[in-house]
């Protein structure tokens, strides 16, 4: 596969930018990864992603629902029960996400070593 820019990738209408901007946020991949196991309640997702705030989880789930990746079902109980499930579109996204997660796990040590060895250009000696 060759990565290239489509001629239609201006600020508006670029499918790569439009979709990957959403997927590239801090929480989306983690939420999708948790929903891979099946339907979860809001509180279950939040407990599995310990450092996400209630507000950020709600926003992330809302955007995933808006994009058709997650479905939301509300049960009329007190308090209301809300379940989240991956849609077929969301399930189809798991294939490339699994590869990205595997790559992150396999290369985590190398990336951390590169970060530790990095010398910012301002700190490099002049030639």
Image: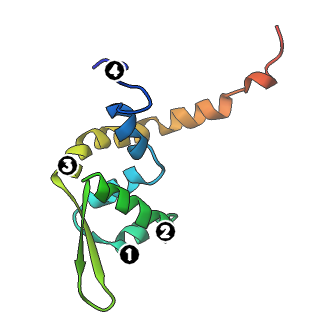
CA distance separating discs 2 and 3 = 25 Å
**Pointer 4 or 3: first along the chain:** 4
Q: Which residue is mark 4?
A: 6
Q: Give me the disc on residue 55.
A: 2
Residue at the far right: name it: 126
Coordinates of residue 127 in the picture (x, y in percent):
82, 7
Which element is circle 4 on?
loop
How packed mark 4 is, by other alpha carbons closer than 10 Å (few <14, some 14-19, many 20 or more), is few
Q: Nearer the viewer, residue 65 or 54?
A: 65
Which element is circle 1 on?
helix
Taking the image as shown, residue 99 lies to the left or right of residue 109, namely: left
Q: Which residue is mark 3?
A: 89
Which element is circle 3 on?
helix
**Pointer 2 or 4: first along the chain:** 4
Q: Comparing marks 1 and 3, which lies closer to the viewer?
A: 3
Q: Which residue is mark 1?
A: 43
Coordinates of residue 21 in the picture (x, y in percent):
42, 41
Residue at left offset 34%, top offset 40%? 19
Residue at the far front: name it: 12
CA distance separating discs 1 and 3 = 23 Å
Instruction: Assess whether mark 3 and mark 4 are in contact (beta carbons under 8 angstroms).
Output: no
């Amino acid at each position: 596969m060759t990565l290239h820019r489509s001629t239609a990738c201006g600020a508006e209408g670029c499918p790569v930018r439009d979709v990957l901007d959403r997927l590239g946020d801090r929480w989306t991949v983690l939420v999708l990864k948790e929903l891979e196991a099946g339907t979860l309640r809001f509180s279950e997702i939040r407990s599995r992603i310990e450092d996400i705030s209630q507000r950020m989880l709600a926003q992330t789930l809302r955007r995933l629902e808006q994009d058709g990746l997650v479905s939301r079902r509300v049960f009329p109980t007190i308090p209301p029960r809300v379940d989240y499930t991956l849609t077929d579109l969301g399930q189809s996204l798991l294939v490339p996400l699994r590869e990205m997660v595997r790559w992150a796990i396999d290369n985590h040590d190398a990336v951390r070593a590169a970060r530790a060895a990095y010398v910012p250009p301002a700190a490099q000696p002049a030639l």
